[in-house]
Amino acid sequence: MSISTITAGALGEKAACELLQKQGYKILERNFRTRYGEIDIIALDFSNKLETLVFVEVKTRWNLDYGYPEEAVTPRKLRLVAQAAQFYKLTHPKTPDLLRIDVVAIEVEGDRVVATRLIRNVTG
């Protein structure tokens, strides 16, 4: 069964939210748009005893011809996510001061997720 890019992206973001919630994250927002670009998921992570505001980039691939999903997160993309994160923080001042960028890599075969990976604290 063939899957469109949009459908794969939606499937990937749903799988990413499920993975993050299993890891103890609380999802605050999805697809937050700014002039710098879109943040796929904004969440709170309580795992290190200090509440951390996490900006999550989700990359979904349905074939690995061009590499693993996480390899598509470039330094430029991380800069844009960081700028969007700063904008979010400015417009949501009551959120935690600790900020982090994570990446969730999703591999899809047909219409099902076959692999998920969470990479914490990604820097460019």
Image (cartoon, rainbow, N blue to C red):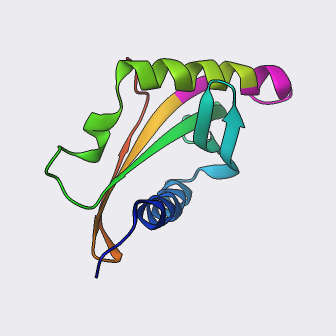
Number of numbered discs present? 0
x then y, percent, for residue 104 = 41, 47
Q: Nearer the viewer, residue 116 or 32?
A: 32
Foreground of the two, 101 or 4: 4
Left or right of 97 in this view: 103: left
- Pick the quarter of the image with the N terminus: bottom left
Image coordinates for residue 111, horizontal then vertical, percent:
35, 77
Q: Residue at position x 53%, y 22% from top?
A: 80
Tell me: residue 121, above or below residue 67: above
Look at the image and tell me in which quarter the C terminus lies. Answer: top left
At x 58%, y 35%, the residue is: 55
Placement of 46 over or under 2, stated as above or below: above
The answer to which image quadrant residue 83 occupies is top right
As for residue 95 lying within the magenta part, the answer is: yes
Specify whether residue 10 is painted magenta.
no
**Side (left or right) of 90 relative to 82:** right
Q: Residue furthest bottom?
A: 1
Which residue is drawn at the image coordinates 21% and 45% (left, top)? 68
Residue 49 in sight here: no
**Residue 75 placement (x, y as % from top left):** 37, 19
Residue at far left of view: 65
Image position of 105 with respect to 53: above or below: below
Q: Quadrant of residue 95?
A: top right
Q: Is 108 on the left-hand or right-hand side of 94?
A: left
| 34 relative to 45, above or below | above
Determine the residue positioned at 42% across, 39% down. Answer: 103
Q: Quick check: can you spot residue 5?
A: yes
Magenta residues, as a range? 88-100
Position of 2 with respect to 11 (left or right) is: left
Residue 62 position within the rendered picture, expressed as x and y whole percent measured from the top left: 27, 61
